[in-house]
Amino acid sequence: VQLQASGGGLVQPGGSLRLSCAASGLTLEVLAIGWFRQAPGKGREGLSCIRGRDGKTYYTDSVKGRFTASRDNAKNTVYLQMNSLKREDTAVYYCASVQGGCPAPYYRDDFYATWGQGTLVTVSS
């Protein structure tokens, strides 16, 4: 499977952005997709996971209520809608996949087998 992340950019605090993660090689029906980010000088942080089969989602407290993961199985693509963005959301965002359901815990990056290339999100005025 290969993953292509896109949708990053510059946005003002309080704004919104939608990231996409297009999968190829395997259908989303058999995958779970995790979203991670890495801010400058920090380690990689797990944010969310969505199970492709039924859309079940998990979120960390830092993004719960602001970020929403969704999927379009017809397009084999997962999205991360990010609202009420804060300066501290500035990071490179990655999607990653694992076969089956979201791992436990879903925010462990070593549980994911395949990674997209990352897309930069900058929240600044």
Image: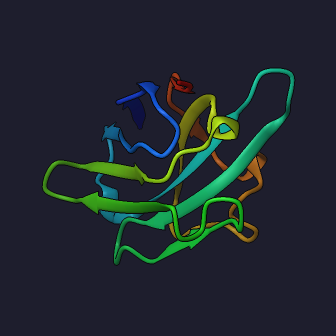
Of residues 118 and 73, the one nearer the viewer is 118
In the displayed structure, 41 sits above or below 63; it is above
Image quadrant where residue 55 sits? bottom left
Image quadrant where residue 91 sits? top right
x, y percent for residue 110: 77, 46
Of residues 67 and 10, the one nearer the viewer is 10
Name the quarter where the N terminus is drawn: top left
x, y percent for residue 52: 37, 65
Identify the residue at horizontal 63%, vertical 40% (top origin). Answer: 89
Identify the residue at horizontal 42%, vertical 27% (top origin). Answer: 8
Identify the residue at horizontal 65%, vertical 48% (top origin). Answer: 112
Name the residue at the left extreme.
Answer: 74
x, y percent for residue 90: 63, 31
What's the colour scheme? rainbow
Of residues 100 and 8, the one nearer the viewer is 8
Q: Is residue 51 left or right of residue 60?
A: left
